[in-house]
Image (tube, coloured by chain):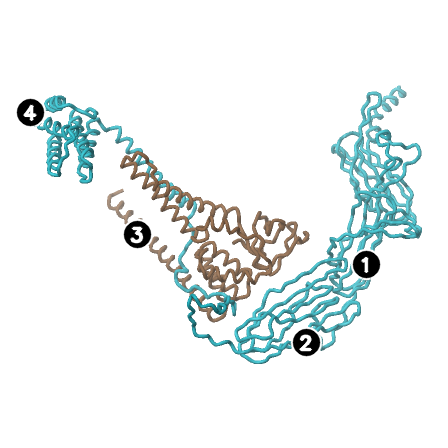
Amino acid sequence: MTAASSDHIKLSAFLITLFACLFAIGLSAAFADESTRDFLNGVELYNEGDYDAAVQNLLKVAESGIQNGKLFYNLGNAYFKAGDIGRAMLWYERALKLIPNDPDLRFNHDYVMTRLKDERVEKESPVFRILFFWKHVLSPLQIQWAGIILNCLFWGILAVRLVLKKRRILGVEGVLALVLSLVFILTSVYTCYENKFQQKAIIVSDEVSIRSGLSDDSTELFVLHAGTRVLVRKTSKDYYRIRFSEDKIGWVKAEDAEII
Amino acid sequence: MKHIFAILLILVGIPGMASGQDVTAHVDRTRMATGESARLSVTVAGQNAADVDTSPIVDFRVISQGTSSSINIVNGRTTSKVVYNYTIIPLKTGRLKIPSLPVRVDGIIHKTEPIDIFVTKQPQADPEQSDIFVTAEVSNSSPYSGEQIIYRFRLYSAVRIANAGFKELPDFSGFSAKQVEQKEAFQTILGGRKFIVNEVVYVLMPLSEGEKTIERAILSCDVAVRRKDGQRDSFGSIFNDPFFRGMRYETRIFQSKPVDVSVRPLPEPPPDVSFTGLVGHFQLRTELENREMKVGDSATLSVTIRGVGNIMDAGEPAIDVPEEFKTYQDTPEEEITVGLNGYQGKKIFRKALVPLKPGDFTIDPVEIAYFKIPEGEYRILSDSPISVHVSPAEEKKPMEVYSGNDEHLPKSLKRKVEFTGRDILPLKEGMDVLKNRRPLSIPFYAALIFVPAFIFIVLYAMLAVFKKTETPGTIMAERADKAIRDACRQDLPQVEFVSRLYCALVSSILAKADVKGETLTAGEVETILKSRGYSDEIADEACKILTDIESARFGGMEMDSGGRSNLFEKTRNIIRTLK
């Protein structure tokens, strides 16, 4: 192979890579434009009172992969106005996971709670809410970054003290940074655990029979209504094993409940 | 020869016949009447588990009563058997047959002998003559669609019983059934005999019209019966109590008769009646929290439907509120219980009314139509109209200022702020809605957490490596630099100042000798410096400065700022020279 042909192959490879990159950038920009258009259409339709169409447009944005608490809040609003209180609650709960301290979201969520038929039995202890206040103030992303920054700070302090040959490598500031970083890192880990193993779901059908087994012939144990939050203990084919309260456990069809 | 062959054949055949008799079936009676029960026992020799198939029995209802096993030792020979017990109840009269039952033992299927049982019609004897009997009845055998009826199953016993329990309950097909938790047990006198009556009650609601049959309920209980003569308990000496003596318990099965129910359709409601679907007996009450209101005030209008029947199906009645009021719906509240009279309770519908204009208004009476039982006719419930007087809202008074020593302070005018309307807050329309706020993935997050720790470990390792390459000379030179830097500080006391200068000078000279140490005499300084090739002048100058420092250090004379500065400059210069 000559040097000229080798150069030609290298040039071709470079051009193909360049075009591929440009194509990928263009494609992502196109998707971004489409999401923007859907979002603006959804807002316009909502303001015009066409709530069903607004839901469809906002859903398209959410289905494109965007996870944003404000988008989920808007979906909750659209569903509520469209008369679907179950899915309104579902999206408000999803939004609460991302922006737990948003006042508008809290207001709307609390209002929709007053419209539910089933009383929420298991409420979070105020003691836990005070002890782990940051979990209800910061979003999961903010907690993750707080953990990362404090962790860097801790190791930075350690490195400086090591270089300066301080007698005690872990000074007061090091201990403080370590405790704070551990708090935020462990909160992130617990949030991950909660999302994986302590899933919650919202009843989305108007009235649902919770049964003793995985068939329509099983005994009806109790009835839940749209918007009620339950703990998902087990998922089986087309059914969830749910827990509403200490003494109310049963199976619900997967189509009647959606994971938050 | 033929005889010998025949004897051998018989001897070989005996074990086969024995194994064929390993499984037997027998009943405790072969004559019975309808409504009675018999005990079927299938005995399997040995201790192996067996699978008895009772599906060929079609003329009887078969109820399993469990198994029992026994081991006998006679003359040193041990035999054992397992008995599978069943209760059988005839489904018709005549000569009925329990066919040959297949029993699988260790993978081999054995067959029992068929048994014939003669079943006669039950003589219409007065049940009150029996010691124990059961009945089943409904409160109304021809209810209307939507009308609740009460199903009562009663167990009458004039003798002692134990372990009473249902073997089979009717499935109440065609009805919605709810058992009444409140169980009844009472005494009654029938035919001059005292019976204890245990009652189980269900509230039934027909799901459709037409003829329906509630199947029979089957109950099993242990009945105390007197022992036959000579049949004494082998533990009689232990249980020598008159309470136990001469009595034993026998399991008996009782079944109620099926109950026929004919569900009638509701008659067509009159044309002017808007039927709500309520069937039973109900009352209506309408209340307004406050009949004297001001514009902007809020008052609750509540409509209570109370009664016996399908109260849970009550929908919200139409409430005609004048247009001058804004209304806010509240969630209905219900208190419904199930008792011996069926479903009863109340359902309350509430609305918050907020007047928008002053004046006198009338809220029209609320009306609901229901089908009244037992009259069997449509009735309309209505309450009287409600008059409301709305006065204009109060003008805001100018702010009054009260001094702290006012004796007659008016009561606080502050009021709790109440919602006058409820709705959700609007959409968030900013374009930041489209930014992805997804939390970091677990691997990426873990990497970001571990990277600083990794960098620190690398740094630590590097420092450890470099530390190993340090010589006593470099260490002492570093110490000299640090000490002279520290001595620069103006706020340092004199003792510390000269101590730092001493450390700096001695360390810099020891660095030249490449040894570690803390102190040196003037003679040692001179020897070290000369051996390292420094001139006599430099060695003498170093010895002189060392002597000056030691004088200041140990002499105790206070130095002025000029003296301090001079000594510092001399020390620094000699250290620079020695470098």
Question: Chain for mark 1?
Answer: B
Question: Residue B66: horizontal and vertical position, in percent?
Answer: 78, 39
Q: Residue furthest bottom?
A: B359
Question: Residue B450: horizontal and vertical position, in percent?
Answer: 38, 41
Along the line of sight, the residue nearer the viewer: B101 or A8: B101
Q: Earlier in the sequence, mark 2 or mark 4?
A: 2
Residue type at mark 2?
Ser
Question: Residue B370: horizontal and vertical position, in percent?
Answer: 72, 70
Q: Are marks 1 and 4 in contact (CB under 8 Å)?
A: no
Closer to viewer: mark 1 or mark 4 = 4
Label 4: element kind: helix
Closer to viewer: mark 1 or mark 2 = 2
Count of numbered tags: 4
Within 10 Å of the Cα at label 3, are there few (<14), some (14-19), or many (20+) other Cα atoms? Answer: few
Please tell me the colour of chain A: brown
Which numbered marker is on residue B536?
4
Q: Which residue is mark 3?
A: A15
Could you give the CA–CA distance between mark 1 and mark 2, rounded to whole angstroms?
39 Å
Chain represented in cyan: B
Which numbered marker is on residue B384?
2
Q: Are marks 2 and 4 in contact (CB under 8 Å)?
A: no
Residue type at mark 1?
Val
